[in-house]
Image: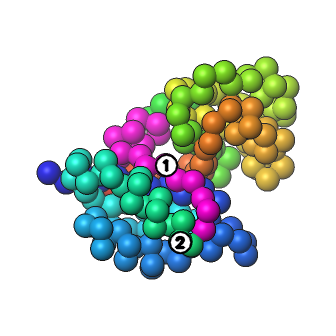
Amino acid sequence: MKADYIALFRGINVGEKNSLPMKALVQTLEQNGYTGIKTYIQSGNIVFQSTAAKAATYTRIIGEAIMNWVPTWHRGVKRQKLKEAADANPFPKAEAESKSVHLYFLAKTPKDPDLEALNRLKSGKESFKLMDDVFYLHAPDGIGRSKLAARAEKLIGVEATARNWNSVTKLLEMAHIR
């Protein structure tokens, strides 16, 4: 039985660097037996269908394929995990300001995040919460100005890829969840 999976790539097609052609990536997924492939914006959001057995090889196959284009990190997320992360959003009132809420999908649950340093970096308007392998950030003045956003991954201590609330909800729609 096939299910929807979501691939979240980090740091691709940002400005002039780390160019990863989405069309070529889609072809690579198709050649490896994945179906129902949909991309969302050029910065590395892909929804696809796969059997559980095939999905288990996804990270290796896609990791090897994209290294032909750019050195990057990505996280595969089952659609249920994305839904659970969205449902657990600790800043529901901020959803109206959808570009101010960011979910950082972490490579794994951090063992020793520096929460004190994260608290010292946040501005008076910012809020964050770390829940297992998702870091939630509400940055109402914008993520580009946020010292907390700039240092979050390093202080959490594991690799991460972030998506704003708009992207999260669009991926949920693409995976037929919302």
- Marks 1 and 2, how far apart at CA: 18 Å
Question: Residue 46: percent from the left, percent from the top?
Answer: 43, 62
Is 82 left or right of 70, judged from the image as shown?
A: left
Residue 133 or residue 66, whichever sits in front: 66
Is 159 left or right of 15, judged from the image as shown?
A: left
Residue 99 or residue 80, whichever sits in front: 80
Residue type at mark 2: give it.
Asn
Is residue 98 visible in the rendered image? The answer is: no
Quick one: label 1, few (<14), some, or many (20+) residues within 10 Å? some
List the residue tagged with mark 1.
75
Is 139 left or right of 2, judged from the image as shown?
A: right
Q: Look at the image and say whether residue 85 sits in the magenta stretch.
A: yes
Q: So how many labels did they put on this image?
A: 2
Determine whether the residue tagged by mark 1 lies in a helix, strand or loop: strand
Quick one: label 2, few (<14), some, or many (20+) residues within 10 Å? few
User: Which picture quadrant has residue 31?
Assistant: bottom left
Is 104 left or right of 114, judged from the image as shown?
A: left
Q: Residue at x 36, y 55 (%)?
A: 58
Vertical position of residue 122 compared to residue 95: above or below: above
Vertical position of residue 2 compared to residue 112: above or below: below
Span colored in magenta:
70-86
List the residue tagged with mark 2.
68
Question: Residue 112: percent from the left, percent from the top?
Answer: 66, 21
Please identify, in this view, whether the residue under mark 1 or under mark 2 is nearer the observer.
2
Q: Which mark is residue 89?
A: none
